[in-house]
Image (cartoon, rainbow, N blue to C red):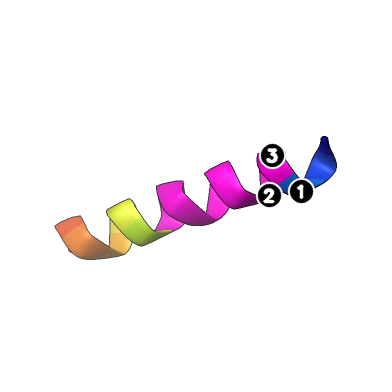
Amino acid sequence: MDVLRRFKTTVKICSYWSVQ
């Protein structure tokens, strides 16, 4: 399930960049 974890992390980073 490492892929799912990585996917969630990517989404989190994407959201962070969106806020910036």
Q: Quadrant of the C terminus?
A: bottom left
| Numbered range of the magenta stretch | 4-13
How packed mark 3 is, by other alpha carbons closer than 10 Å (few <14, some 14-19, many 20 or more), is few
12 vs 9, left or right, is: left
Residue position for label 1? 3
**Residues at discs 2 and 3 in contact (Cβ within 8 Å):** yes
Q: Secondary structure at mark 3?
A: helix
Residue position for label 2? 6
Q: Quadrant of the N terminus?
A: top right
Counting from the top left corner in percent of width and height, residue 11 is at 44, 51
5 vs 10, left or right, is: right
Which of the 4 image quarters holds residue 5?
top right
Residue type at mark 1: give it: Val
Distance, label 1 to label 3, CA atoms, is 5 Å
Report the number of numbered marks. Answer: 3
**Mark carried by residue 19:** none
Distance, label 1 to label 2, CA atoms, is 5 Å
Asked whether 11 falls inside the magenta stretch, the response is yes
How packed mark 2 is, by other alpha carbons closer than 10 Å (few <14, some 14-19, many 20 or more), is few
**Residues at discs 1 and 3 in contact (Cβ within 8 Å):** yes
10 vs 5, left or right, is: left
Residue position for label 3? 5
Residue type at mark 2: give it: Arg
